[in-house]
Amino acid sequence: MCCIYRDLGKEFGQWLDWVLEEAEVYDYGRYPAKGMGVWLPYGFKIRRNVVELLRSLLDSTGHEEILLPLLIPENILAKESEHVKGFENEVYWVTHGGLQPLDVKLALRPTSETPLSYMESYWVKSYKQLPKKYYQVVSIFRYETKATRAMLRVREVTTFKEAHTLHEDFTDAERQVREAIDIYRRFFDELGIPYLVSKRPEWDKFAGAIYTIAFDAMMPDGKMLQIGTVHNLGQNFTKAFEVWIQKKDQSIDYAWQTSYGISERVIATLLAVHGDKKGLVLPFRVAPIQVVVIPIPAGGDNVKKYVVNEAIKLGECLKKAGLREYVDLRDDITPGEKFNIWELRGVPLRIEIGPREVKEGHVTVFRRDLRAREKVPREELVDRLKGLGEAIDNNLKNRAWGAFRERILRTNNVQLARKHLRGGGVVEMPWCGKPECAEKLAEVLNADVLGTPLDPYEVPANEKCPLCGHKAVAYLRLANKY
Amino acid sequence: MCCIYRDLGKEFGQWLDWVLEEAEVYDYGRYPAKGMGVWLPYGFKIRRNVVELLRSLLDSTGHEEILLPLLIPENILAKESEHVKGFENEVYWVTHGGLQPLDVKLALRPTSETPLSYMESYWVKSYKQLPKKYYQVVSIFRYETKATRAMLRVREVTTFKEAHTLHEDFTDAERQVREAIDIYRRFFDELGIPYLVSKRPEWDKFAGAIYTIAFDAMMPDGKMLQIGTVHNLGQNFTKAFEVWIQKKDQSIDYAWQTSYGISERVIATLLAVHGDKKGLVLPFRVAPIQVVVIPIPAGGDNVKKYVVNEAIKLGECLKKAGLREYVDLRDDITPGEKFNIWELRGVPLRIEIGPREVKEGHVTVFRRDLRAREKVPREELVDRLKGLGEAIDNNLKNRAWGAFRERILRTNNVQLARKHLRGGGVVEMPWCGKPECAEKLAEVLNADVLGTPLDPYEVPANEKCPLCGHKAVAYLRLANKY
């Protein structure tokens, strides 16, 4: 089975490479350094709309955008011992400035907990300043030695939104973890991306965190992709960097931290969960072009001219109504070719306007998600387009969630679980809580451990760990991971 | 003389360091790597508004935003020989990924002519695709060995807008140079920043360009700062990277290029040319907060509460009117302290509202640029604020240009020129056109050559080069440069 969502016409990996290139989203593989790609104009606009959506969610919840330097001196990166152990094998190092060797090696940021904690030791003194919520949208670098893949596993992640917060106590950091999860839920919901929220097992948490909560999405091949993480960092970094605060009760203590991040993988996911064999299917919310207007020339020159003028006027009217529109007036390709191009690029709505439409005072509207046409009278057009935009986003979200839920199976039967995983998806199995049982289960199922549900639903008393037979304390989620 | 614009209360360098820190714009000098700083939330918002203004000018003139990787393989950077000679001594090199040495050294981009030309050799085939206008807003890196200085001379330029264009022939590239100059003029005009547009002398052009046009602004100490450049690159890079196109007449030729850039120096300039000893004075156009509302509590608790509520209501009303407002409700500092804080941060307009104002149905409006108060009836407030915003931007622009023009002296008298330059500013001297005379003149005046005016105004026939006595062909601009 090649796609759990809908027909991609080819294997998912091939489809993604094809659509990124053909729809002019991201040029990957031609750039002369491995694991790095170029955002093309159309792709950049998708990226921008997605990032702006995330920004608006963060800004409206008291997050402040900042920008830290890219380069982190070796001694700063090394200050938190777990952290540096987790990253030292995958950091790029700058060793020379011009022809001279540098005194201190500089790392290209893999993430910014260390330099920010260093700065926070200057900035923050009192509980009165807390909570503090910073974020930045930057490039990060990881020297991936595994096979790289456009947007999914790259060496330069060009779009990393990392948030970092500071708190007076553990309780407030816990509240922040919940807030971050809530923000991410809203973000993915706006994009119509289905997800699971799991607490990662101890051995798979972020280097330097107390625990990690992760969002996983399902790719069309049924494999899971981590698209967001939220970490409670406790006082690990504030101790290493001496971020002291005076608390309300006058005592002095280290501050508490959380951090949470989302990368351009969310854009790959956006394309993957909604796309089909004709190409992209973009939600109205983030589509660079929401409505494309295509004049259908027919008849004599005067009629053609008239139709083109009507199309231009229509475009202006849509623009005035706040819609992102484009009137495709090219005369060296046919309307049919234009249809294909804009369907490939995922434009949610297309207006076809020919002599008959002009004469009868209506237009034909085509919606990309259902590939269905309807006639709309001119005077109702703007309202109808906005309504359709909403309907498209709802439909994309619902059908993606529908397909996603179908591929999640709760069972205590190892045979069934194995069979289910072969078709792609996730299994939830009762689990005793012991790491060795989780490890063994992953081995038996030839799968990876995603973790346990964020708020573990109650496991019935008769459910036993299928390996050791002890009482289950939670369900364990397993799947094949990217 | 410490400031050609207005009283900074201290020497310009000290003032800039002071204002960046106190107004919480940019934390420089505490970051543990030299020549790199952190954009703080308030500064980030200024940066963002300035960058968005530039984006809107570029987008509306057919420029398309893209994003190229940061890392450039050594062999790509080295392809255009003049270019690599110009940059090899100031490029940061990545030599290791994790613990492994890399096969090919990777440069942190100093600018993106080389990787983009490489990609364009794949993207562009025909004159029908031209002109192409790309831009990106990114960090660039230069290993400065001179003394670094916050925003003016840094090792990581965190805000570099670089545009790159492709053309069918030289004529169209020349047209593009003019378009770029026009866009930059509009950009600096919107910010109220005075500038000179000069053609740089041959020995000071961009490495790889046919010629370079530069925008120079005057710092308060009278020294000139390059804040924008426009290059006609000819076919230098397209030949090195084999960017062939088929022309309209079916012949095959290399494409023609231009590139033009603006960095965060424009933000330093924005702060420098309008600021005063109380701190920043921001144009209304780009101020993160355009109007701050400060309740003046007086009288009993009920009256105080009433005033605070009125201030909140006022803030909501301003927000609804599309103004960027902030209501400062802190109760642990006095109104006077709030006045100082927001004046330091350059908020263009302040509303003071106390019991009397509420009762009488007006508010007191203070404008930062003139430090003047006026009473405005509540019902006229929104219109008046918008009008004042415009008036402030005009006043800032006019007074900056006034001070700027006063410091430009045209003379053929070397003594006068030397005296003028000691006070800061620019001299324009008749020049025979010979490089050796320009060099000698710079030496005699202890100044740098900015170049010649973009459209050389006619030099009267009796004007002679003060050095060799030959007929002058142009005025030569000289000044002390940052």
Image (tube, coloured by chain):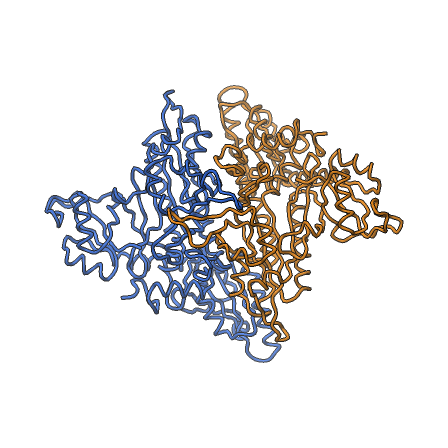
Chain colours: A blue, B orange
Instruction: From the top left corner, tell me how far across and down residue B313 is, in percent.
Output: 52, 34
Instruction: From the top left corner, tell me how far across and down residue B468 is, in percent.
Output: 84, 47
Question: Which quarter of the rendered picture does the N terminus of chain A lie within?
Answer: bottom left
Closer to us: B277 or A482:
A482
Closer to us: A243 or A3:
A243
Residue A320 seen: no
Closer to us: A187 or A244:
A244
Q: Left of B222 or right of it: where is A198?
A: left
Instruction: From the top left corner, tell me how far across and down residue B481 is, in percent.
Output: 68, 40
Residue B288 seen: yes
Q: Residue furthest front?
A: A100
The picture quadrant where one finds residue B366 is top right
- Tell me how many marks there are: 0
Closer to us: A156 or B286:
A156
Question: Which quarter of the rendered picture does the C terminus of chain A lie within?
Answer: bottom left
Instruction: From the top left corner, tell me how far across and down residue A151 is, in percent.
Output: 40, 56
Image point (58%, 43%), residue name: B264
Q: Is residue A217 above or below residue B39?
A: below
Q: Residue furthest right?
A: B462
Q: Is residue B309 above or below residue B169?
A: above
